[in-house]
Amino acid sequence: MERIGFYGAARTVTGSRHLLSTGNKKILVDCGLFQGSRELRQRNWEPFPVDPTKIDAVVLTHAHTDHIGWLPRLVAQGYRGPIYATPATIGLCKISLPDSARLQEEEARHVNKRGDSRHQPALPLYTEEQAYESLKLLKPVGYGKWHDLPGKAVFRFHPSGHILGSAFAEITFENGNRILMSGDLGRYNTPIIRDPAKIDRTEYLVIESTYGDRLHSHENVLDKLESILSEAWQTGAAVVVPSFAIGRTQELLYYMRLLQDAGRMPRIPVFIDSPMAVSVTRLYQQSKEEMDEDMLVSLEEGRSELEPEGIQFVRDVNQSKALNVQRGPMVIISGSGMANGGRVLHHLMHRLEDPRNIVLFTGYQAEGTLGRRLLDGEKQVRIMKQEVDVRARIERVNALSAHADQQEILQWLSGFDAPPRKTFIVHGEPPAQEALREKIAAMGWNVIIPEVGENFDLE
């Protein structure tokens, strides 16, 4: 009997961890970090409900932190099996997991120095050494190539169009039944990477619902960026852009290059203040197997769509600190994307109280994050134990998202020849999940929203 258990991204949009059982073998699909509220982050410190030494394999759908960020902790607790992922996902893991560990170790040092932790001493969730240990278990599997899993199961990856290396994992059990683990579903006709692959059949489906209750804006991204950059140029403002290092930063660079080519962007200094984003951008430029046709043509012509003229990549921490005293006009693109950590916190501390400045959000902001509080209009926020007045203008580019909206999810589902026996909705806040369930159920599908820790038989 095959079963699936949901130990993350159930009734929430973070911490994806789904455990498949076939015979006496266990396969974990994604191993994500919980992000957002303190209650959610506390789950990262809890032991995995199943002994990690009893898990036989891990399959990763893509390299966002809420899908891979708990891997070093899993390995530190005894997991020693293979971790399967696409080559590009592995490349991103090698960048992001050590970076995550360094940030956690740095935060623990700061907390211990201040002496205001409830724990003595404060410890990182995992260390850089543990992150590197987890990388040793990564095994590449290319798109479309069948690969064996424990319990006589097999699987293959299909492009999901979400970020570089992102994939649907199609897993077939010994009895012939299939389950499609969609990970995060990307969008159609977006720049840089390929569109989501069409899937026509599966017995069981796990689908995300981040934007299950809404449609993305049809605003013109180029017009919005041009307006903000031109205003900053005229007023001397600093535009602070909390941005995800994987995917969103590269999209912003792509659109800035388009503006420059069209003569619509002022010569405003743009700083990418994220060592991780710098490394990820290099990986994007090298991963030709992931690119759509437009990107491949540009490379063949000897130009990079991801390096606008005058862009400055910041790696050194002293260079980053120097930006805090530099006068505008300027653009600072820095992580993290939800403003819940990283260098962007320092820039927000120094820029939020100036009404000339602009904070520009370009992606989803989970409940409990600083980004969500700023978008919700809070007039004072707490950053690194300090109260900061919010006088800067808060803006958002609504049309930029790596997640499919409700219509795009339904468009992808319409490619199936027949409904799955069961469709499980995960990776979304409850209103989004409920709205998407209504839409999919109206198609005659059997739809389930699992609770955390809930298990289901796959008959």
Image (cartoon, rainbow, N blue to C red):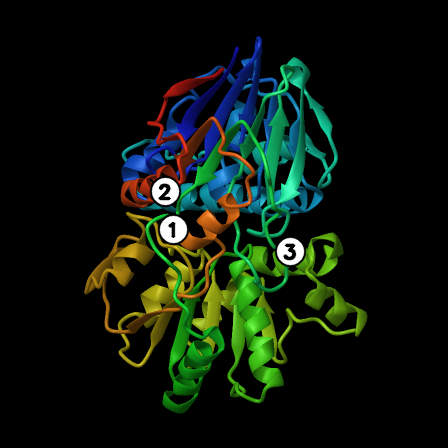
Coordinates of residue 244 in the picture (x, y in percent): 49, 56
Query: Depth check: 22 or 268 in front?
Result: 22
Between discs 1 and 2, the one toward the N terminus: 1
Residue 26 in the image: above or below residue 67: above
What amino acid type should be assigned to the residue bearing mark 1? Tyr
Residue depicted at x 46% and y 82% = 226
Mark 1 crowdedness (10 Å alpha carbons): few <14, some 14-19, many ≥20: many
Between discs 2 and 3, the one toward the N terminus: 3
Residue depicted at x 28% and y 62% = 375
What amino acid type should be assigned to the residue bearing mark 2? Gly
Residue 329 in sight = no
Between discs 1 and 3, the one toward the N terminus: 3
Coordinates of residue 253 in the picture (x, y in percent): 57, 70
What residue did someone put label 1 on? Answer: 211
What residue did someone put label 2 on? Answer: 428
Q: Are marks 1 and 3 in contact (CB under 8 Å)?
A: no
Mark 2 crowdedness (10 Å alpha carbons): few <14, some 14-19, many ≥20: many
What amino acid type should be assigned to the residue bearing mark 3? Arg
Coordinates of residue 434 in the picture (x, y in percent): 29, 40
